[in-house]
Amino acid sequence: MRPGAGGTLRIPSLGIAAPIDAVGLDGTAMAVPNDVERVGWLTSTARAGDVVGASVLAGHVSDEHDRPGALHPLIRIKLGARIFWTTPSGDTASFRVVRIRLVPRAQGLPAAMFSAASRRELNLVTCAVRVTTPQGGFHYTSNLVVTAVR
C-alpha cells in the first residue's frame, strides 16, 4: 500500500473527503486500507485521468467498534451526484453517479467493474446490510456499489 498515492476522493453532497491509498490484491480480494478514514484504489484499474476503463475504489463503512468510516455516508448517495477524484499532482476528474446497487458478498463483485476496455467509469465499493451476530458483534452481507461516469 502506498498512502496518499491515489490522491483524494470528494463527494460534496455527502460531506466525504478522504485520502486515497494505492492498493493491490490480498490473495484474490482487493486490499483496503486498515485506516477506516482512507479509501483504497486498486492500481490494476484505471487511474483518475484515464479516458477509458473502469476504476475501483473501496473503503470501510465502519470499524470493528462501529465507528464510521470514510464511506459511511455513501448509502445516502443519489443518482446524478457528483464525485471528484483529485490526483496527487492536483488534476481533478469529475464523475456523475449513474447506478447504485447492492451486491450480495457471497456473489462477488461483477467482473465488468474491473474492465480496462469499458467506458470511463468509477466504481465505489463499501459494505452494506449490517447483520448482528448472536455474540453481539456484526458483519455485512452485501456490498454497496456506486457507479459513476466521466
Image: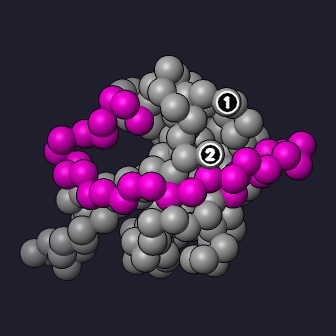
Q: Quadrant of the C terminus?
A: top right
Q: Which mark is residue 149?
A: none
Q: Is residue 139 above or below residue 39?
A: below
Left or right of residue 123: residue 2: right
Left or right of residue 131: residue 54: right
Does residue 65 show up? no
Left or right of residue 46: residue 28: left
Is residue 67 found inside the magenta-colored segment of the image?
no
Q: Position of residue 43 (x, y in %)?
A: 61, 30
At numbered mark 2, what does the secondary structure look like: helix, strand or loop? Answer: loop
Depth check: give the residue in front, 50 or 103: 50
Is residue 105 found inside the magenta-colored segment of the image?
yes
Q: Amino acid at mark 2?
A: Arg
Task: Name the residue carrying label 1.
Answer: 51
- Neighbour tally class for label 2: few under 14, some 14-19, many 20 plus, Cα within 10 Å: some
Q: Quadrant of residue 142?
A: bottom left
Q: Quadrant of the N terminus?
A: top right
Q: Amino acid at mark 1?
A: Val
At numbered mark 1, what does the secondary structure look like: helix, strand or loop? Answer: loop
Task: Name the residue carrying label 2.
Answer: 150
* Residues rendered magenta in the picture: 84-113
Q: Is residue 67 above or below residue 101?
A: below
Q: Quadrant of residue 141?
A: bottom left
- Neighbour tally class for label 1: few under 14, some 14-19, many 20 plus, Cα within 10 Å: few
Between marks 2 and 1, how big is the CA–CA gap?
Answer: 9 Å
